[in-house]
């Protein structure tokens, strides 16, 4: 009988700021380094607990500050510096890119850094009701009212079923400012493409929201220039006020950057084997297997690391070409299925 890895549930509501903040802080928690000799000396119970902690770190995601992070961080820093002593908003950053480029991961790292900065300045800020960072996903076929309800839910505002769009807009704007939010992230903005007649209204709602809050908005999505976000008068205002940050692409001409990325990712995995040797050759193979996509690379390396830990042979916790190829085959199979679903979705739209 198979002993399945049952889901570990923490009961957090990630659509509410408390649950999201706790999850974000846990995402930033890294394991202290443990050498192979130390691991071998651990009692069986400690080994089991350590392996569980390793699996938790891998599945929640490791932090690698790659070229995309540097690009977005630099642009966001400039936007925040220019408006540091101003009031009101209307400014932000657009992050547009193809799938599997790590847009959401970059946003999570930036939110974590801002959150830690605020906690360092005031360790009691969360207990005082402050919400340093906010995050929502833009739903497909959404409306301005739906967007405001999601934000109201995140901030824990007491709302009923009869609030008007104007009322919710004012409540959300007041909450963002009162809770001293440093950044508001709105993900999956490409869903405006599928929002039908409501999508221009949602674009206008984002623009109005940005005008009256004292923090930048980070808008993430796929090919945002092809959505209703930047179309019409409202879109022109967003395009004029928001700066665009580019996601790094890894072409064959930039293999050195790719190799550094692979090294950083593999080094971040809590594996006990010696993964220093043959890294250049492995990185080149991973470039082909992952098709130069960060999302695919992360999936391949993370799946391989979980397999190595499950094998219970710490000396052999080394990422090999054979294992990487096997995990890449799994990723390709999943990608093909997603591609078929997306084609049907576009056809239906």
Image: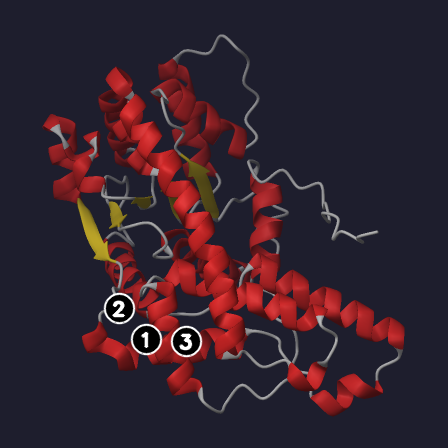
* Residues at circles 3 and 1 in contact by the CB criterion of under 8 Å: yes
* Residue 316, image quadrant: bottom right
125 w.r.t. 120: above or below: above
- Distance CA(mark 2)–CA(mark 1): 6 Å
Precedes in sequence: disc 3 or disc 2: 2
Q: Secondary structure at mark 2?
A: loop
Q: Is residue 246 left or right of residue 141?
A: left
Q: Position of residue 343 (x, y in %)?
A: 31, 34
- Distance CA(mark 3)–CA(mark 2): 12 Å
**Residue at 39 percent of width and 30 percent of height:** 173
Q: Is residue 44 left or right of residue 60?
A: right
175 w.r.t. 118: above or below: above
Judging depth in this view, the residue of 199 and 129 nearest the camera is: 199
* Residue 288, image quadrant: bottom left
Judging depth in this view, the residue of 67 and 84 nearest the camera is: 67
Judging depth in this view, the residue of 2 and 219 nearest the camera is: 2
Q: Secondary structure at mark 3?
A: helix
**Residue at 38 percent of width and 85 percent of height:** 281
Q: Is residue 148 visible?
A: yes
Q: Which mark is residue 250?
A: 2
57 w.r.t. 158: above or below: below
Q: Position of residue 40 (x, y in %)?
A: 80, 86
Q: Is residue 264 left or right of residue 212?
A: right
Q: Is residue 62 visible?
A: no
The residue that mark 1 highlights is 258
**Residue at 42 percent of width and 21 percent of height:** 146
* Residue 197, image quadrant: top left
209 w.r.t. 26: above or below: above
Q: Position of residue 201 (x, y in %)?
A: 25, 20
The residue that mark 3 highlights is 262
> Which image quarter holds the C terminus?
top left
């Amino acid at each position: 009988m198979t002993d399945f890895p049952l889901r570990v549930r923490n009961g957090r509501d990630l659509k509410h700021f408390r649950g999201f903040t706790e999850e974000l802080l846990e995402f930033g928690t890294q394991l202290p380094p443990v050498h192979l000799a130390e691991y071998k000396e651990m009692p069986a119970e400690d080994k089991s607990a350590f392996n569980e902690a390793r699996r938790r770190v891998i599945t929640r995601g490791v932090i690698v500050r790659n070229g995309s992070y540097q690009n977005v961080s630099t642009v966001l820093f400039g936007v925040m510096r220019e408006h540091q002593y101003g009031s009101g908003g209307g400014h932000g950053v657009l992050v547009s890119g193809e799938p599997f480029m790590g847009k959401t991961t970059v946003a999570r790292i930036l939110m974590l850094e801002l959150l830690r900065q605020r906690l360092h300045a005031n360790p009691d800020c969360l207990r005082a009701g402050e919400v340093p960072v906010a995050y929502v996903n833009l739903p497909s076929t959404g409306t301005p009212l739906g967007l405001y309800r999601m934000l109201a839910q995140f901030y824990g505002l007491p709302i009923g079923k009869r609030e008007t769009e104007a009322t919710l807009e004012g409540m959300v704007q007041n909450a963002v400012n009162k809770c001293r939010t440093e950044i508001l992230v709105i993900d999956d903005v490409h869903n405006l493409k599928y929002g039908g007649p409501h999508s221009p209204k949602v674009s206008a709602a984002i623009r109005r929201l940005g005008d009256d809050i004292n923090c930048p908005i980070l808008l993430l999505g796929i090919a945002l220039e092809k959505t209703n976000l930047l179309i019409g008068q409202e879109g022109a205002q967003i395009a004029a006020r928001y700066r665009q940050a580019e996601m790094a692409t890894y072409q064959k001409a930039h293999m050195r950057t790719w190799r550094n990325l692979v090294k950083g990712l593999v080094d971040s995995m809590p594996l006990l084997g010696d993964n220093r040797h043959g890294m250049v050759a492995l990185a080149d193979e991973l470039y082909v297997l992952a098709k130069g996509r960060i999302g695919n690379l992360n999936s391949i390396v993370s799946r391989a690391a979980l397999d190595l830990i499950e094998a219970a042979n710490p000396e052999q916790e080394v990422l090999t070409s054979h294992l990487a190829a096997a995990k890449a085959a799994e990723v390709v199979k999943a990608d093909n299925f997603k591609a078929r679903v997306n084609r049907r979705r576009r056809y239906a739209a």
